[in-house]
Amino acid sequence: MSSSPSSQFTGYAAAWTIVFVWSFWLIVSRVANDSGLTIYDLAAMRYGLASLVALPLCLYYKPWRGLRLFQIAVLSFILGPVYILCVFTGFHFAPAAHGGIFMNGVLPLISITFALLLFQAKPSLRQVMGAALILLSAIVLAWDGSVTSEPDAWVGDLLFVIGAMFFAIYVILSERWQLSAMQIIFCGTVVNAVLYLPIWALWLPSGLADAPMGPLLLQAVYQGFVPNLIGLLLIAHASRSIGTANTSSILAAVPGGGGLLGALILGESLSWISISAIALLTLGLLISVRRRQPPPV
C-alpha cells in the first residue's frame, strides 16, 4: 500500500527534522564528558525524565494492548540501556563527528545486511555499489581518526557501530510491525525506566549531586526528552510513511552535520582525508538508498 502525498510530505519533514536534532544531540552527548555526569546518569535521564511525560499518556491510551509480549521484550531491549550505554561510552573515545559517521552513516549498509540475513531480501547492484563506498569511507574515517585525533578513537567507532546495529533493527521493526507512536514510547521509555532506574539508583556510580547546574539542565533537557520522545516519534513516522530505506538515507545526512557542528562548536579538527571520506560516504548513501517509484498497477 502506497502512502498518500500528505503522508509522504510529513514523513520527509520528520526525517529531515531529526537530522538537525540529532546533529546537536551528538554535540550535547560529547560535552557530557565534561559535566561530571556518568554515562549511567545520562541513561537515567533518558528513561526517567521521558517517562514522566510518557507514563500518563500510556496509562490513558494503553498501547500494550496491541503488542505481543515478545514484541514488547524485543523492542524494549533494542531501545534499552545496552544500546544507549554503548553510544555514551563511545563519546569518551571518539569525536562527535565519528558518532554521526558510525551510527547514522552506516545505517543503510547495516539495514541492507540485516534485510538479507533476516528476510532474504537481496540487494540490488546499486545498493551493493553504495554499500561498498560506505564501507570504504568508514574504514578511511576510522583510520584517519585514530592517526590524527585520538589513538583510541577506534574503540568509540566500534561502540557506535554496535549502537547503529541496534538502531537499524529498530527502524526495520518500526516499518514491519507498523508500530504506533505510543507503542514505541511505552517500550522505549516506560518499560526501560521501570527496569533500569532501580538498578541505577542502587548500584551504579553517579555524579548527579556534584554536576554544575548549567550542564546538568542541558543534559536533562536534551537527553531526557529529545531522543526518547521527539526522536523516536519522528523516526517511527518517517519509517511508516516513506519506508526504511528512505528514512535511513536521510538520517545518514547526520555525519556531515555532526562533523560541521563538531568543528564549529567544539573545535574538533577535520583533515582533508576526513572531509573526502565524508563526501565519499555521501555518494555511497545517494547510490545505495535511492528508490525507484514502483510502477502503477
Image (spheres, rainbow, N blue to C red):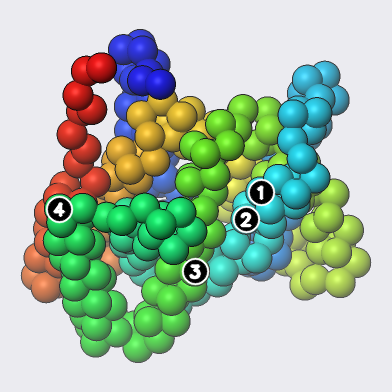
Quarter of the rendering containing residue 19: top left
- In this figure, which residue is indicated by the disc labeled 1? 75
Q: Is residue 287 left or right of residue 139?
A: left
Circle 4 Cα neighbour tier, 10 Å, few/some/many (<14 / 14–19 / ≥20): some
Q: Please state which amino acid type lies under the numbered disc 3.
A: Ile
* Above or below: residue 3 compared with residue 131: above
Q: Secondary structure at mark 2?
A: helix
Q: Residue at x 31, y 56 (%)?
A: 122
- In this figure, which residue is indicated by the disc labeled 2? 78
| Residue 269 visible in image | no
- Relative to the observer, which residue lies in front, 130 or 219? 130
Q: Is residue 239 left or right of residue 98?
A: right
| Residue 238 visible in image | yes
Of pointers 4 and 2, the one earlier in the residue sequence: 2
Q: Please state which amino acid type lies under the numbered disc 4.
A: Arg
Q: Please state which amino acid type lies under the numbered disc 2.
A: Ile
Residue farthest front in this picture: 297
- In this figure, which residue is indicated by the disc labeled 3? 162
Q: Secondary structure at mark 3?
A: helix
Of pointers 2 and 3, the one earlier in the residue sequence: 2
Residue 167 image position (x, y, % from top left)? 50, 54
Q: CA distance from mark 2 to mark 1?
A: 5 Å
Q: Are marks 2 and 1 in contact (CB under 8 Å)?
A: yes
Residue 157 image position (x, y, % from top left)? 39, 74
Circle 3 Cα neighbour tier, 10 Å, few/some/many (<14 / 14–19 / ≥20): many
* Above or below: residue 254 compared with residue 242: below
Q: Is residue 44 left or right of residue 125?
A: right
Q: CA distance from mark 3 to mark 1?
A: 16 Å
Q: Are marks 4 and 2 in contact (CB under 8 Å)?
A: no
Q: CA distance from mark 4 to mark 1?
A: 31 Å
Of pointers 3 and 4, the one earlier in the residue sequence: 4
